[in-house]
Image: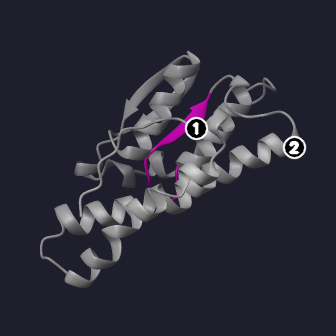
Amino acid sequence: MIDLYYWPTPNGHKITLFLEETDMPYTVIPVNIGKGEQFRPEFLAISPNNRMPAIVDRAPLERGAPISVFESGAILLYLADKSERFIARDLRGRVETMQWLFWQVGGLGPMAGQNHHFSRYAPETIQYAVERYAPTPLRTWRRIPGSCPTRRRVRISTTFRT
């Protein structure tokens, strides 16, 4: 059983989508970031960077003590290994999958987050930030068609606001 420490953020959604796709049993443990619950000591023991999401696997494959994992990319990789789905077993296929995973968590995700923050949520308009981050997610997203192998491509409808 997986305990999913969750709040409905883009990174949290990645994990719920994966768990649902693989039919892995899990329990959602809400962590309300609007109330600062991610700073509670019990959550920091699982996710020392106080970020959503985090998991505790109470039934790891090796049957040892529970394993806690934080950061969405690390969680996805862990769950892919555990479920033996969405990750190749051969080295080349595994590397191909991991580089696209890291591309998302290190590039597209953060750039889209900055874009949304500065274009929608910032208390004041900072023109430099808007001009810097608004085109970056779309530019990054456009790299997929020529680079990502067709057999592994997933179509996702996304709107970027500029």
Q: Nearer the viewer, residue 31 or 17?
A: 17
- For the residues labelled 2 and 1, the Cα–Cα distance comes to 19 Å
Q: Residues within 10 Å of mark 1 (few under 14, many from 20)?
A: few
Identify which amino acid the numbered label 1 is placed on. Answer: Arg
In-image side of 104 versus 92 (left or right): left
Q: Amino acid at mark 2?
A: Leu
Q: Residue furthest right?
A: 90
Residue 63 in the image: x percent, y percent?
78, 23
Callout 2: SS = helix
Q: Is residue 11 magenta?
A: no
Name the residue carrying label 2. Answer: 91
Q: Quadrant of the N terminus?
A: top right
Question: Is residue 46 among the parts visible in the rendering?
Answer: no
Which residue: 60% across, 39% down?
A: 76
| Percent x, y of residue 102 | 62, 55
**Closer to the camera in the image, 156 or 65:** 156
Give whichever of 161, 19 is nearer the camera. 161
Res 127 seen here: yes
Tell me which segment is drawn in magenta: 47-57
Residue appearing at x 29%, y 43% in the figure: 32
Find residue 22 and name its label.
none
Q: Residues within 10 Å of mark 2 (few under 14, many from 20)?
A: few
Is 54 covered by the magenta stretch? yes
Q: Pick whichever of labels 2 and 1 is earlier in the sequence.
A: 2
Q: Is residue 74 above or below residue 121?
A: above
Q: Position of residue 75 (x, y in %)?
A: 60, 41
**Prevalent SS, magenta region:** loop
Residue 62, picture quadrant: top right
Residue 23's place in the image compared with 84, above or below, is above
Q: What residue is disc 1 on? A: 153
Q: Position of residue 158 (x, y in %)?
A: 34, 44
